[in-house]
Every structure is written in C-alpha cells, then in structure tokens.
Image: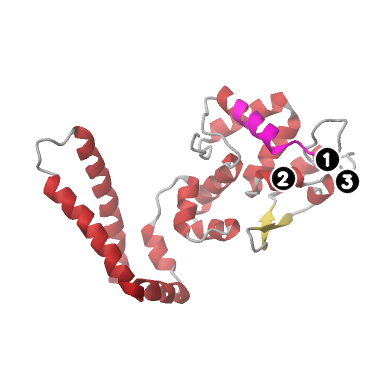
Amino acid sequence: MNWVAPIKDLETQQEFKEALKKVDYKYYILFELGIGTGLQLQDILAFKNKDVRGKKEIDVSIGKKGTKVTFKIPKYLQKEIDNYTKGKPASHYLIPGHATQDKPVSREQAYRVLRKAGLKVGLSSIGAQTMRKTFAYNYYRETGDIYYLQNLFNHASPSITYRFIGEKPNVEIFMRKLTPQENERSRLLLYMNGNGKNRLNGIIDVLAAIRDRIDSPINNDAFYGRVECLLDELDSIMESYKKAEEQN
C-alpha cells in the first residue's frame, strides 16, 4: 500500500482539481470541500445539500467518544457550494451516486476517481486521507499553528499531527507552548516505574552502539548515510532543547 501524502505543491493541486472536473464536477466539489475544511471523506459523502448550503461551519462528531468538532467553511468555498447546489433539492445528497438510486457516491468509487486523477498528474500517493492531509499542510504552511490542527483532528499529540502532514516537528514550539497540565502529566509519566530513565538509557545504548561501530571497516555507505541523518535530527532537537532550557 502506498503512503498517502498531502499535495504540497499549489500548481499540482490545481492540476489535480482540473483532472477531477473532467471526470465530473461533483468530484471537484468533493475535493474542494476536503482541502478547504479538513473534513474526512466519509463525512463529506454523507452530506446532503441542506447540510452545507448557506453554512459557515459544520459540526461533526468524531472518534469513539463522539467528540463534537467544528469545521469552518472558507468564504470562497461557501460560494462554490452555493453555486453547485443552486436549484438542487435540499434532501438530495451533495455528492450523488447513480441517478436511479438515492445514495451518495461510495467511498470506494470516490477513492478510485481520486487515485486515477492523481496518476494523470503524476501523483501515486493519493488515498482517502489526501484531502485532509492537504488541508492540514496548507493550514500549517500559512499559520504554523500545529495545535489548532491537533485539536481539530482530535490527535493525542502534536507529534502525530506533524507525521500526518509529513513535516518535521518544531521542538522549540512544543516546549514553549506546553501547558502546566501537560508538564505535570509528563512528570508523572517519566517518574512512573523509572520510565524516563529507561527511555533515556535505551537511547544512550543505541547511540553508544553506533559510536562503537562507526570506525568499523565493514560498514557500507548506507550506514554512514543513516547515521548522518540521525545526527542532523539530533543536533536540531538538542539545539531547541538548549534554547528552551536557557529561557527557563
């Protein structure tokens, strides 16, 4: 299975939209709603015209606990939706399936169309989460606010959200924005059963093994490539940590 990634290039996003229009305009609306709000594919497919027409925001229950989350609809997208739904019955599905059935397009059909359009513009990493990840990437690029996205998607931590959009975590921002409650939680977790020391010892052991191996003549070039990447990441994280410590 291919890794599903956001479409990060704006020109490619536009090419993708044009490819969807050629299939059917409803798929273009589907994609615009996905990258404009961050809503999941299955939620969009369940909408009827009345659920989105004339709306500035949409409330959706997500997760096992049914957490209520509000997704905002940008003004440009409100106009797109109003034009698209104009004259259509309020009770009809926004993204209708076969004309003879009162059902929306299936998730499988939507996925096939999205994937085929992606291949036409040279994208192989297209999937059901592409729209949501693209929304998140666009929002993060414009605002740098990973915490808004974390709350919107109900992620357990900012690290998960960073992985979701394929970006490296900004550790300095993490440390600067931690709340007293989060700091207290971290203290308890790291104290419990020596968890903090055990994790640090595990990291130290791995680094020590790399250090002891680094001069071995049997290492191939790939080993040194991996080590250099690791050290670059560690350098960045340690620099952020030192800055945060100096500010306290």
* Left or right, residue 91 beside residue 228: right
Circles 3, 2 touching at the beta carbon (< 8 Å):
no
x, y percentage for residue 40?
A: 65, 47
Q: CA distance from mark 1 to mark 2?
A: 14 Å
- Residue 205: quarter of image: bottom left
Question: Is disc 1 placed on a helix, strand or loop?
Answer: helix
- Locate the C terminus by quadrant: bottom left
- Residue 222: quarter of image: top left
* Residue 44 numbered mark, or none: 2
x, y percentage for residue 51?
A: 80, 50
Residue type pointed to by label 3: Ala
Identify the colour scheme used. secondary structure
Q: Residues within 10 Å of mark 1 (few under 14, many from 20)?
A: many
* Residue 90 numbered mark, or none: 3
* Left or right, residue 67 beside residue 214: right
Q: In front here: 96 or 165?
A: 96
Q: Which residue is mark 1?
A: 85
Q: Nearer the viewer, mark 1 or mark 2?
A: 2
**Magenta-drawn segment:** 104-116
Q: CA distance from mark 1 to mark 3?
A: 8 Å
1 or 3: tag closer to the N-terminus: 1
What type of secondary structure mainly makes up the magenta span?
helix
In the image, what residue occupies the spot 60% across and 58% down?
152
Q: Residues within 10 Å of mark 3 (few under 14, many from 20)?
A: some
Q: Residues within 10 Å of mark 2 (few under 14, many from 20)?
A: many
3 or 2: tag closer to the N-terminus: 2
In the image, what residue occupies the spot 32% across and 67% down?
244
